[in-house]
Amino acid sequence: MRNQILPLTFLFFSILFMALSGCRSEYERIRMSGDQERILEAGMEYYDKGEYERARNLFELVLASYRGRAQAEELYYRFARSHYELGEYLLSAFYFDNFASTFPNSKYREEAEFKAAYSNYLLSPTFRLDQKYTHNAIDGFQRFVNRFPNSPRVQECNELMDQLRKKLERKAFYQADLYYRMGSYQSAVASFEHLLQDYPETEDAEKVRYLLVKSNFLLAENSVLARQEERYNATISAYNNFVRRHGGSAYLSELEEYIEISKNQLNSLSYE
């Protein structure tokens, strides 16, 4: 019995291998043929079947040949979409954006502009890293909303922009807090102030203003004598702003100690 099974198993795998080899060789024959029409036709077929890698490779071979021809619009759109489906978002962002510029009247333009922005959204990294793609995505979604205000995707674009802006806000707080923890108080003061200017509705406003008072105070404490008066006054000003906005804050008792020291230091400086 065992002797009968082994030849059948070998035959099955041999047939399977030949079938797979046949598929590969057909694709390779088309790819190497130099027949532009056949390559384009096969690329479209692979695309329709969801075989995006083969479709992309074949489309790439004939892009230049079909530039300015009737098939160019469909070809270029599918080429960009193949990159997107393969998770090659850097390239899909580039090609979708290029498509929208090259074919401004295309039925695919709305889709292409959204996908260009969304590709950048998918490239946006954790808040600790460089936020180039985050900014690119926000710019792309905003352009989309401006150009297609009646699109059903407008709400989604606004929600995605809110997410990305929240990431930028978190990045700004992280950077300012890092300066504070490193003892770079002048940079911390500037960063906390910019954060409040850029994100006035931030949920962390109370903590940011608390750290702004502390950063000003510690900057004054570590300053040369000639700069102390200016910086203790800045501490008091930041504190007064904090009290106006967060009068019932749990941080107040701590900050009052810094203000008391600041006032005493100013009196000493005036006497000197």
Image (cartoon, rainbow, N blue to C red):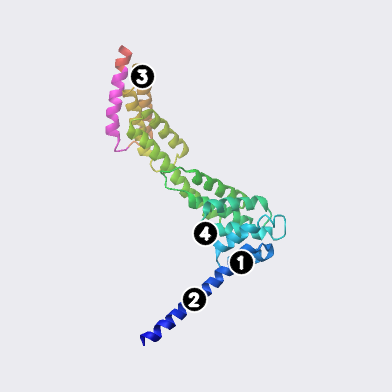
Where is residue 21? Give x, y as percent.
53, 71
* Separation (CA) of disc 2 from disc 3: 85 Å
Question: Farthest bottom residue?
Answer: 1
Where is residue 83? Give x, y as percent.
55, 57
* Foreground tag (2 vs 3): 2
Q: Toward the viewer: 170 or 63?
A: 63
* Separation (CA) of disc 3 from disc 4: 61 Å
Amino acid under label 1?
Arg
Circle 3 sits on which residue? 229
Amino acid under label 4?
Leu
Query: On the picture, is 28 further left or further right than 73?
Result: left
Q: Which residues are magenta?
A: 248-266
* Separation (CA) of disc 4 from disc 1: 23 Å
Query: On the picture, is 139 further left or further right than 245?
Result: right
Which of the two labelled residues, at mark 1 and mark 3, occupies the earlier sequence position?
1
In the image, which disc is placed on residue 29? 1
Question: Which quarter of the image is occupied by the N terminus?
Answer: bottom left
* Separation (CA) of disc 2 from disc 4: 27 Å
* Foreground tag (3 vs 4): 4
Q: Secondary structure at mark 2?
A: helix
Circle 2 sits on which residue? 16
Q: Secondary structure at mark 3?
A: helix
Circle 4 sits on which residue? 86
Dot 3: within a 10 Å radius of its alpha carbon, few (fewer than 14), some, or many (20 or more) residues? many
How many numbered marks have been drawn onto this rendered protein structure? 4
